[in-house]
Image (cartoon, rainbow, N blue to C red):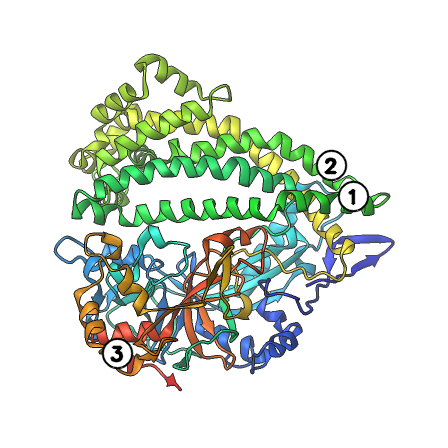
Amino acid sequence: MGKFRSVLAAGMLLPALFVFTQKPASADEGMWLPSLIGERIDDMQEKGFRLGAEDIYSINQASLKDAVVLFGRGCTGEIISPEGLLLTNHHCGYAQIQKHSSVEHDYLRDGFWAMTRDEELPNEGLTVSFLERMDDVTGRILEGCTQSMTERQRDSVIKANSEIIIGEATAGGKGLRATVEAMYYGNQYFLFLYREYSDIRLVGAPPSSIGKFGGDTDNWIWPRHTGDFSIFRIYADKENNPAPYSPDNVPYSPRKFFRISLDGVHDGDFTFIYGFPGSTREYIMSEEVRYISEISDPMKIALRTQRLGIQKKYMDMSQDIRIRYSSKNANVANAWKKWQGESGGIRRLGTVRAKQEYERRFSEWAEGTEYENVISSLDSLYGELEPYKYASECYAESTGTVELCNFAWKIAGMAASAYEDTSGKSQFPAELAKAARDFYQDYYLPVDRESFVSVMNSFARDMDGKSEPEYFRECIARYGSVENWADSLFHNSIFTDSTTVLSLEAADTAVVRKDPAFAFAAGFRKWHDSEILPACRRLDGEIRLMYRKYMRGQMEFEPERDFYPDANLTLRVAYGKVCGYSPANGILYEPVSTLEGIMEKDNPEIYDYNIPQRLRDIHAGKDYGRWAVTDANGNSTVPVCFLATNHTSGGNSGSPVINADGNLIGINFDRVWEGTMSDIVFDPDYCRNISLDIRYVLFIIDKVAGAGHLLDEMVLVE
């Protein structure tokens, strides 16, 4: 989306009202808006795509967009049968699998397969959303905005206009919801209209020894051999409309579902990803990149390293603790490892220096224009923001991670919502019991206490000489050490005992607010929310305003450059090809992995590499059935994963990987470690997405799980 033109009226530039166009890119970088894909279809077809723009996105006929869903609020999924069968990643469905697991029925360890529809498991709170349409509403959103307005006044007008547009779009429709999203830092706005379904049932999941094979050791690393998939089914009422869970609901009948290709992938094949990338910041300036790579990432990595080590120690001791902390541990580890690759990639590419040089040239060009002070203003604002930003992130990664104290804060909030029952007795909301059950089900005090000591000692070191909460200084003075503080807090808090918490009544509000766990949460929140957060918000707002101008300036400075909007969890198209890469001198990675790699890593003594015996037996007997392929050495094996050059981000987890004919060939689930800086800077030599070969999914369903009835629903194409 390179060129734009301003619209002039009455001698005044209308506020950020532009027409953006797309043109071919030289590399495979880019996350393109599907409603404008017609402007890129020639480039896609030149690279091998054999369908048209209407096949990708259409509001007049069924198109591929109708087979793609936002899974929950942070992943992607795809429909693969006329009966609402849905594929996503194992890690996207992990929380649901965990909730259904227990020591007696450990679906994380053993996997789960519904052999009949009656055995499919409902998932409270889980939704999937189909995009009905997206519309450019820039003109309507900015109606009433003037250049003389303050940013707060402008935001107020935009909010009011958005509410009107959203109300009109969702009027009278079952399950409709809508959002208005800013693109290019508020230079353009789009309406996204979704239809949301809430009766989503778990159908199948491989054991974690397949679905999470390699664990955190292999996370972000190639070669990869993770069977990262899970299967759900969407249910609807008898008119195919969204409806709450009911035994009377029926499988959803989709407008479109993916046919599944059995042809496999080969080096150089066209690939196309359709999904909901979460967040990228491709156009930020050098000062923010420097802060991320040299200050923020290293601090957060160090704090999470401590927590991960503590969690692992206790998880290795007990199956029960492992189940409780599996999802938490995976969430902590995911960003921890990603940040390591991100900061390393930024340094390797010299991104800070490159952006500084770009900003120098931009400033020379901008002399005498409305953009001449943009770079100096941003430099100044970032210098003012940095200490506040650091304090906020340190707070979030240390004090904000103490589980017991966060729970105490939540219960105190419920106490504020106490009400009188019919007898006049004060009662907590009914949600308290559920909140308590959910918390204690996945809580183990020794983990939390040891983490408290570790992160609070780090907080003392990291914030030494900087702004510290008065509450923190008082506690250190009172107890003499963090260790003594922890002993007192965890010994005296009522929140360490589930029975006491479940017996609380509204009359106990004062007890809750005097509790040391609540005092901890309240003391740090007061400091953060009164001293740190206001400054962050003020400066972030000023920076965002300046970026709106900087974005326009960049487009005028480089009118021939491709500018795609940063990811913001809205539906995007990314395309490229199957391709390996060289991470270091003398190393060349092939773009495919196979079952042989799993067997090379298999080790019953290591949890992350201990595969099911069933898979060992299948390999020993070469019992691969129709899923067998011949590798480069002439051996019979099964394909597992492959690399491609598609530009992806968080949120693309679970995205369908599509071939030149529009058929499903894989499920996206990761990026290579050396390319995780692609949220900030895309390097075509290193940036690769990792996808699960759809044939491995089918192989696991058929030969390992014995759930061939699911294959009968699908349309397989050779």
Measured as percent of width and height from the top left, residue 424 is found at 23, 36
Is 521 located above or below residue 224 in the figure?
above
Of residue 681 and residue 542, the one placed in the foreground of this image is: 681
Marks 1,2: beta carbons within 8 A: yes
Q: Circle 1 is placed at which residue position?
A: 363
Dot 1 crowding, Cα within 10 Å, few <14, some 14–19, many 20+: some
Residue 376 circle label: 2
Q: Circle 3 is placed at which residue position?
A: 624
Of residue 378 and residue 147, the one placed in the foreground of this image is: 378
Q: Is residue 422 visible?
A: no
Whether residue 546 sits left or right of residue 526 in the image: it is right
SS category of the residue bearing label 3: loop
Residue placed at 61% from the left, 66% from the top?
135
Amino acid type of the residue tagged 3 in the rendering: Tyr
Q: CA distance from mark 1 to mark 3?
A: 62 Å
Is 80 located above or below residue 300 in the figure?
below
SS category of the residue bearing label 2: helix
Residue placed at 24% from the left, 21% from the top?
488
Residue 445 circle label: none
Of residue 450 and residue 87, the one placed in the foreground of this image is: 450
Q: Nearer the viewer, mark 1 or mark 3?
A: 3
Q: Residue furthest left?
A: 104
Amino acid type of the residue tagged 1 in the rendering: Ser
Q: Is residue 158 visible?
A: yes
Marks 2,3: beta carbons within 8 A: no
Q: CA distance from mark 2 to mark 3?
A: 63 Å
Of residue 263 and residue 128, the one placed in the foreground of this image is: 263
Sequence-earlier tag: 1 or 3: 1
Measured as percent of width and height from the top left, residue 187 is found at 68, 54
Measured as percent of width and height from the top left, residue 52 is found at 59, 81
Is 170 located above or below residue 678 in the figure?
below
